[in-house]
Image (spheres, rainbow, N blue to C red):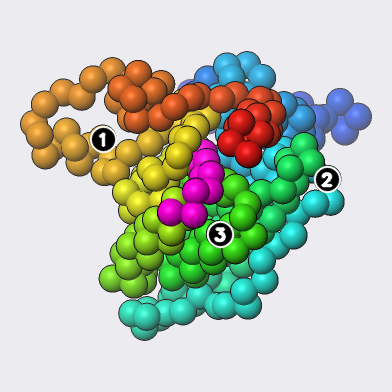
Amino acid sequence: MIVDKIKKRESPPQNKKNRVDIPIGKWVKCDKCKEIIYKDTVRENLSICPNCGHYFRMHINKRLELIADAGTYKRFDLNIETSNPLGLEDYPKKIKALKEKTGLDEAVAAGTCKINGEVAVICIMDSGFLMGSMGAVVGEKITYAIEQAIEKRLPLIIFTVSGGARMQEGIVSLMQMAKTTAALTKLDEAGLLYISVLTDPTYGGVTASFASLGDIILAEPGAMIGFAGQRVIKQTIGEKLPEGFQTAEFLLEHGFIDKIVERKDLKDTLYKLIMFNK
């Protein structure tokens, strides 16, 4: 049979000297332009795609390097642990694994720092920890930071990135919306500045509470901001959504945010706003 006469092709011998080994974990794919980029190149470019300008999400530590003067960040040590109010079997295991993976205690870090020499209270959320969802500890840390801003008479800055309230903590997570909002009311009554910086994505109960209550609301370019997702809204109202719906640019045009600020300009912009309101 002719099949018997077909010999299996042998792979040509590989020259180890010519073989290219691509290190695992050294590359990242841009969600916008789909290009494969060397991770160090992205980091050196402030976590922005050098090809299309797409903004990657930033780890809390990288954000602090960008915003705070070197060596000035002092974390609030509350010594509180994430609870399991619904008694879910896998929730504590997931929290433990995330702590080890991200090097974070929770989805937000809070403390004081200097921005070009000016002291401020700063909170930074991280999408790598359960998508920045707001549970009891996140709500308590943000509320404590607000109270410290009032006590020390300092401006407050919160960087948000979140999928919303944390479903694993049920009604307890929803209570954090009222808790943080009440604390911000006291900050406002004290006449202190609150700057909210919205990054991609900011959704759900976070948008519906402290993220939207800033005296000044800034956003990074292209950030997706809203309450419910686009698919849910479209199904609810039964209409086609406008182009660019829920992007920072769309919300700026409709008056929801005050300014879109590029990452490289954020520190100087925050400094100027603090100085204007002294």
Q: Nearer the viewer, mark 1 or mark 2?
A: 2
The image shows a total of numbered marks equal to 3
Cα–Cα gap, marks 2 and 3: 24 Å
| Vertical order, 85 against 138 (above or below) | below
* Label 3 to label 1: alpha-carbon separation: 37 Å
Q: Is residue 101 visible?
A: no
Check disc 3 and report its element: helix, strand or loop.
Answer: helix
Calculate the distance from the C-alpha at mark 1 to the C-alpha at mark 2: 40 Å
Residue 131 in picture, x, y percent from top left: 47, 52
Q: Residue at x 51, y 45 (%)?
A: 194
Q: Nearer the viewer, residue 14 or 55?
A: 55
Residue with the mark numbered 3: 150
Label 3 vs 1, first from the N-terminus:
3
Q: Which residue is mark 1?
A: 230
Toward the left, the furthest residue is 238
Tell me which amino acid carries mark 2: Ala
| Residue at horizontal 59 percent and vertical 57 percent from the top | 149
Find residue 249 and report its horizontal and vertical position in percent. Answer: 41, 21
Q: Viewed as shown, does residue 119 lie left or right of 80?
A: right
Residue 74 location (% of width, % of height): 74, 60
Q: Please give left or right for residue 146 compared with residue 61 in the image.
A: left
Closer-to-camera residue (45/123): 123
Taking depth in this image into account, of 32 and 34 the one nearest to the observer is 32
- Assess whether mark 3 and mark 2 are in contact (beta carbons under 8 angstroms): no
At label 1, the amino acid type is Gln
Q: Which residues are magenta?
A: 189-197
Judge from the rendering whether residue 26 lies leftward or rightward of residue 121; answer left or right: right
Q: To which quarter of the image does residue 18 belong?
A: top right
Q: According to the image, label 2 marks what residue?
A: 70
Determine if the magenta segment contains residue 196.
Answer: yes
> Comparing marks 2 and 3, which lies closer to the viewer?
3
